[in-house]
Amino acid sequence: MAAAPERRRYDSLVRTAQADETRRQIAQAARRLFVAQGWGQTTVREVAREAGVSVPTVYSAYGNKKGLAIALMDAADLAADPDRLVAELAAADDPPGQLAVSVAFHRRLYERAGDVILLLREGGRTEPELAAAYREGPRRGEEALLRLFSSWPAGALRDGVDPRTAVDMYGAICGIDAYTGLTAGRGWSPERVEGWWTGLLTRELLG
């Protein structure tokens, strides 16, 4: 009898993995179509066809076309390799190392998915769904940074800098506008931006 519960747990894990992979496929398809065609011109049916799934599967994963705005944020996060972020944060053994890992993640995010972020922001001027999704991205990031900074031992942050303030300072420095201004506007390489951000944040945040 013990094998039955074990089998059910295995089946549940398989179904979860399959559902996650389906969401990834839909998110990546939504990104390709919305970037190429625009939000207003793209239908749920087209996203389903591009993802290789049925229309009901898209609705099951994201609800409706409004939910596909969140799919765009998911696609941006996936492009930056969140699994790598988690693994590298776990491997880093001190705040400077974890700070550098976080900066590297944001560099990847802007380098690989800056087009999606800018699409959401610009589209959000006229499309409320895109505006909500654009706000959701930074909210997720800030919550993750707050958890990270709050986990550090006393004295890791500079005097006068608490975790919430550290999140504010990080966001002011490590943003999409700063990244595009330095790369597209000033000709900096992504590697140079990452190195400068890491050094600046280390000096400004850490004790």
Image (cartoon, grey):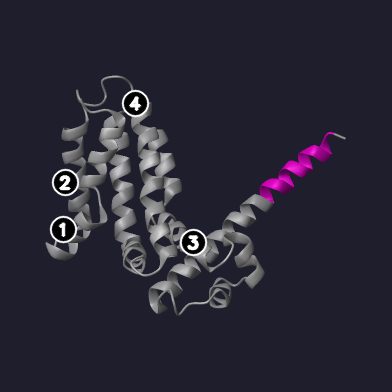
CA gap, disc 4 and disc 3: 32 Å
Mark 1 and 2 residues: CB-CB less than 8 Å, in contact? yes
Which residue is tagged 2?
A: 196
Q: Label 3, on which residue?
A: 71
Rendered residue at 54%/65% (across/down): 26
Query: Which amino acid type corresponds to the residue marked 2 in the rendered image?
Result: Trp
Closer to the chain start, of discs 4 and 1, is 4
Tell me the crowding category of disc 1: few under 14, some 14 to 19, or many 20 or more residues within 10 angstroms, Cα based: some
Q: Where is the C terminus found, in terms of image quarters?
A: top left
Q: Which residues are magenta?
A: 2-14
Q: From the viewer's perspective, is the residue at label 4 or at label 3 nearer?
A: 3
Q: Main secondary structure of the magenta part?
A: helix
Quarter where residue 155 is shown: top left
**Residue in the image at 66% along x and 69% along y:** 56
Can you give x and y, in whole percent of width and height, for residue 96 in the image? Answer: 26, 32
In the rendered structure, find residue 182 and report the number of the disc placed on it: 1
Q: Name the residue tied to disc 4.
A: 152
Question: Residue 179 in magenta?
Answer: no
Tell me where residue 117 appears, x and y as whole percent: 34, 61
Residues 35 and 22: in front is 35
